[in-house]
Image (spheres, helix red, strand yellow):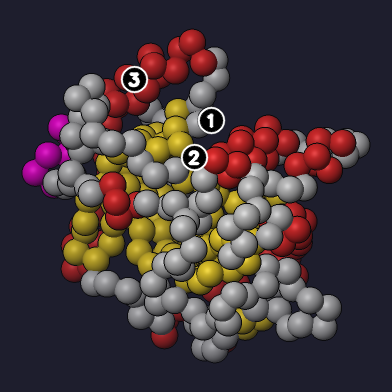
């Protein structure tokens, strides 16, 4: 299973333009990716369901889905512990349309039927003397499927929506395969609880808001510098993790005085689910 290794810090909203300029120059990324993503937290209210009940169906399908290995990893993980997952869809083009119209617009059919990402992030590892203090790491699974298919798979496995929000991000990449992400979240969107994952026949498409009229949750952005370390081949995993720690350490040193990366409390990123929805 891949491992996300990352640094975190806070960037005040007033310093965002300066931060973007610094990151643009540091990474020499052209062009920069600016994205809006609809994020839905999904979980199971029925705690007796374990794993992914539809896994056998996926294993016996012909042809087998490209994401079968990821489904198997998720099944193994959820067989041991319940987690809050996220379903993610890029709504950037729809947001542009809503801003141009000056009012909410229905999610386009292209976005509705396009690719979604189901993401599992594990509870970050505890502090380890072999890992720099400012570096956090956690297992991650991304499953990419067309929206209607992914939502049906999740509904058939007992999942429903706990809450949803929109995140805004800027992305840069450097020559060492590190991703730099400026991230902020907008206020939660109204949603019945629990909300169904699957759009029923005749139901209107979700309304994409005019983001120029939305308020962010806080007057700051979060900066993540991250590497995704592949788990294969297993016998070189420790070596690749050490290399990722070194690359992040180099970034932290070179950006010293510009960004101060934080020793973050891993409990703030706890995704384990015990039956209580996030606030």
Q: Would residue 173 be seen by someone viewing this image from the given angle?
A: no
**Quadrant placement of the C terminus:** bottom left
Could you say where residue 8 lies in the image, as x and y percent from the top left?
Answer: 26, 47
Q: What SS does tag 3 mark?
A: helix
Bounds of the magenta span? Answer: 252-258
Which residue is tagged 1? 1
Residue at the image point whose x is 51% and y is 52% from the top:
83
Residue at the image point whose x is 18% and y is 34% from the top:
133
Q: What SS does tag 1 mark?
A: loop
In the image, 258 versus 141, the foreground residue is 141
Could you say where residue 108 lies in the image, as x and y percent from the top left?
Answer: 70, 73
Which residue is tagged 2? 140
Q: Are marks 3 and 2 in contact (CB under 8 Å)?
A: no
Residue extending farthest to the front is 48
Other residues around mark 3 within 10 Å, as few (<14) / some (14–19) / many (≥20): few
Q: What SS does tag 2 mark?
A: strand
From what the image shows, is residue 59 above or below residue 116?
A: above
* Mark 3 / mark 2, whichever is N-terminal: 2
Which residue is tagged 3? 243
* Mark 2 / mark 1, whichever is N-terminal: 1
Using residue 110 as the reference point, say whether residue 33 is left or right of it: left
Residue at the image point whose x is 45% and y is 36% from the top:
139
From what the image shows, is residue 222 above or below residue 73?
A: below
Residue extending farthest to the right is 62
Quote the CA–CA distance across marks 2 and 1: 7 Å
Q: Is residue 257 magenta?
A: yes
Residue extending farthest to the bottom is 103
Q: Are marks 2 and 1 in contact (CB under 8 Å)?
A: yes
Residue at the image point whose x is 58% and y is 57% from the top:
47
């Amino acid at each position: 299973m891949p491992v996300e290794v990352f640094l975190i810090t806070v960037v005040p909203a007033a310093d965002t333009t300066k931060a973007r300029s610094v990151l643009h120059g540091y990474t020499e990324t052209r062009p920069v990716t600016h994205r809006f993503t609809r994020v839905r937290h999904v979980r199971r209210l029925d705690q007796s369901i374990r794993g992914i009940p539809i896994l056998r169906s996926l294993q016996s399908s012909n042809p087998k889905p490209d994401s079968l290995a990821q489904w198997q990893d998720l099944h193994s993980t959820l067989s041991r512990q319940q987690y809050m997952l996220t379903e993610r869809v890029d709504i950037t083009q729809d947001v542009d349309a809503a801003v141009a119209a000056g009012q909410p617009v229905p999610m386009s059919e292209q976005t509705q039927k396009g690719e979604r990402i189901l993401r599992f992030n594990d509870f970050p590892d505890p502090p380890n003397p072999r890992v720099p203090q400012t570096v956090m790491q956690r297992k991650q699974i991304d499953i990419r499927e067309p929206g209607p298919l992914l939502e049906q798979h999740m509904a058939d496995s007992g999942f429903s929506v706990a809450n949803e929000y929109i995140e805004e991000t800027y992305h840069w990449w450097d020559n060492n395969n590190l991703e730099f992400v400026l991230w902020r979240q907008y206020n939660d969107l109204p949603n019945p609880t629990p909300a169904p994952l699957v759009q029923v026949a005749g139901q209107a498409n979700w309304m994409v808001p005019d983001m120029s009229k939305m308020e962010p949750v806080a007057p700051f952005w979060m900066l993540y510098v991250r590497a995704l370390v592949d788990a294969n081949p297993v016998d070189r995993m420790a070596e690749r993790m050490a290399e990722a720690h070194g690359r992040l350490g180099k970034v932290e040193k070179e950006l010293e005085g510009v960004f101060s990366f934080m020793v973050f409390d891993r409990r703030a990123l706890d995704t384990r689910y015990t039956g209580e929805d996030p606030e």
